Image: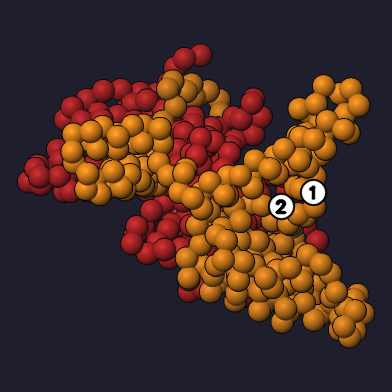
Amino acid sequence: MRNIPTDLYALAGHIEVPDLPLLVRHFLEFQLSNNTSSDTALPPDLSPDSPISVFHSAIATFYAPSDLSGLGGMHTECIRSTPRWRKGQAHYDMVFLERDPDILGMRGLHVGRVFLFFSFSYNSAKYPCALIQWFSTISEGPDEDTGMWIVQPDLDANGRRELEVVHIDCILRGAHLIPVYGHNHLPIDIQHTNSLDIFQAHYVNKYIDHHAFEIAF
Amino acid sequence: MKVCLPAIEGHVPSEMVRTLSAFLDFCYHARRNSLNESVLGSLEHALECFHHHRCIFQETGIREHGSKGFSLPRQHSMMHYRHLIQEFGAPNGLCSSITESKHIKAVKKPWRRSNRFEALGQMLVTNQRLDKLAAARVDFQSRRMLDGSVLSAAMRDVELWYGEHDDTGEDSDNIDDDEIQAADDGPRVLNHVRLAKMPGILQPTICLILSSHCVFYSAKHSY
């Protein structure tokens, strides 16, 4: 049962994302351009040093002083990204990602959905990263009635999800999204497991806890 | 309330949604552990919005018109938050039903201290003694008998012994305070994410259907 694809191309075929090697390549180019050795050109046939490890969850630790439940407001939270949650349906969590730490509120944040946590080594440096689908805000401000921002999943011209590989340090914490239900009756086959795939737009729920209220206004 | 706000959106007048949204804003602002002037401004703004939008409950006949409409103690107490926070600091999640919290101090804790035999008399004596202790503490503080710790008092004596009788004793107290301040200065790192310890197993039969087209349910929401 333990036939985990550890090769980049095999993994790309396994999760049906043929662009994965290209995305990893973009990611590495971006990471290396930030370092001092900016002149290192990537070889055309990119292969990491070590086998790729795939993870089904990650732990976010953050400081939320208004929510005193841990030691002085420290919180940990599990972000899951697993194709079978407890032998059932897939479970891909939403996360907040940092866009600009100087801007407060949702304007300094991205919202994304984690489809894969994986890590690999390249040039003896370890890169823990995540495959993210972006969600973008539909307007310049929050919804006037509810006070929450509305986001939509980013799709390309063919209606496919736009994916990107980001470093795990960009991830802030988990996010809570509620669908914009609309005024019609909902089809009966909508479950809690697939509502993120089905609805067109979602509220970013800032009222879910005090920390979310302080970062996602 | 925090998850049903989007659910009622569109099914009740939008003024009602705004009322609840403003109320939640107020609650979450008041719950913060530190409040600066801008947060107090937002608190005030949320309260104004709440008062403005809640009139819909009178217009639709849910509450009575006139002065009896919103004569509710909790909603009235919201008006005093700003002033009282400025006077006494952040409420830090204090329950607004003050009699309940007094009940814990005045009844539950003394009862736990008693040996349960004729508890009422013991509780009254406990409360009396606690009140006297609190009064004595205020008195001692006004006489500056409780400044610093035993250690700082000993340090001051030692310094006096060596003839350094300037204001060094008070200085050392101030340094102590500064160090405490520095040690409790809030977060060093904003957040930290790490992967799980063990890599997972990908079942070959289950694939992520990432590349397939997403079928969206058209919510027909008018934004």
What shade has chain B been given? Answer: orange
Q: Is residue A146 above or below residue A164?
A: below
Give the mark, 2 or 1, whose residue is nearer the N terminus: 2
The residue singled out by tag 1 in the image is: B100
Three-letter amino acid code of the residue under disc 1: Glu
Q: Quadrant of residue A51?
A: top left
Q: Quadrant of residue B79?
A: bottom right
At a point 64% along the width and 47% down the height, the residue shown is B135
Q: Which mark is residue A74?
A: none
Three-letter amino acid code of the residue under disc 2: Cys
Tell me which chain the residue with mark 2 is part of.
Answer: B
Q: Of helix, strand and loop, which one carries label 1?
A: helix
Q: Nearer the viewer, residue B141 or A97?
A: B141
* Res. B100 in view: yes
* Labels 2, 1: front one: 1
Identify the chain drawn in red: A
Q: Position of residue A18 (x, y in %)?
A: 38, 40
Q: Of helix, strand and loop, which one carries label 2?
A: loop
At a point 47% along the width and 23% down the height, the residue shown is B200
Q: Nearer the viewer, residue A146 or B136?
A: B136
Q: Is residue A38 above or below residue B63?
A: above
The residue singled out by tag 2 in the image is: B95
Q: Are marks 2 and 1 in contact (CB under 8 Å)?
A: yes
Tell me which chain the residue with mark 1 is part of.
Answer: B
